[in-house]
Amino acid sequence: MEESKSKSMFRHEPIESSDGKPTYNIFKGNQLIAEVRGTNPASQSIIPMRELNEYEESKLHEYIGNLKEQVE
């Protein structure tokens, strides 16, 4: 699992949330690109902060889809 983390173009950091849901800032390098509230893909909110190309956006959704596994 460590190997896949090091190859990802994204990383996440937990932040405080007023609604009690797990909330994360998602970074590409040092740039904040999204805020994700919740880890359940069916009910999470994704707030984009930067425009991404189609490939980056696809990889971001893949990363976010696996976020629950990464934080447990």
Image (cartoon, helix red, strand yellow):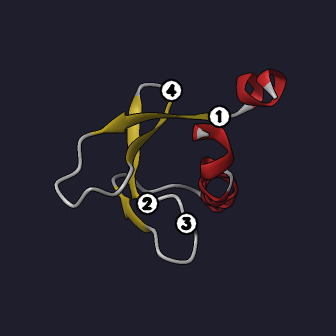
Q: Which mark is residue 27?
A: none
Is 72 situated left or right of 52 in this image? right
Q: Nearer the viewer, residue 34 or 52?
A: 34
Secondary structure of residue under mark 1: loop
Q: Nearer the viewer, mark 4 or mark 2?
A: 2
In which image quadrant can residue 3 be found? Answer: top right
Q: Which residue is mark 2?
A: 38
Question: Are the residues flagged by discs 4 and 2 in contact, CB closer than 8 Å?
Answer: no
Extreme residue in the bottom direction: 42
Tag 3's secondary structure?
loop
Residue pointed to by mark 3: 40
Looking at the image, which is closer to me, 5 or 16? 16
How crowded is the residue under tag 2: few (<14 C-alpha within 10 Å), some, or many (20+)? Answer: many
CA distance separating discs 1 and 2: 21 Å
Q: In the rendered structure, which amino acid carries the disc numbered 2?
A: Gly
The residue under label 1 is 9
Q: Position of residue 60 (x, y in %)?
A: 61, 53
Helix, strand or loop at mark 2 = loop
- Label 1 or label 2, whichever comes before in sequence order: 1
- Looking at the image, the residue that sits furthest to the left is 18
Image quarter of the N terminus = top right
Mark closest to the chain's N terminus, 1 or 3:
1
Task: Identify which residue is drawn at 65% across, 34% down.
Answer: 9
Please, what is the three-letter code of the amino acid marked with disc 1?
Answer: Met
Viewer-nearest of labels 1 and 2? 2
Which picture quadrant has residue 4? top right
Residue 29's mark? Answer: 4
Marks 4/2: CA–CA distance = 22 Å
- The residue under the point 57% across, 39% down is 71
Q: From mark 1 to mark 4, how far is it between C-alphas?
A: 7 Å
Task: Tell me, yes or no, whether the two marked residues, 3 and 4, touch with CB atoms within 8 Å.
Answer: no
Residue ID at (50%, 26%)? 29
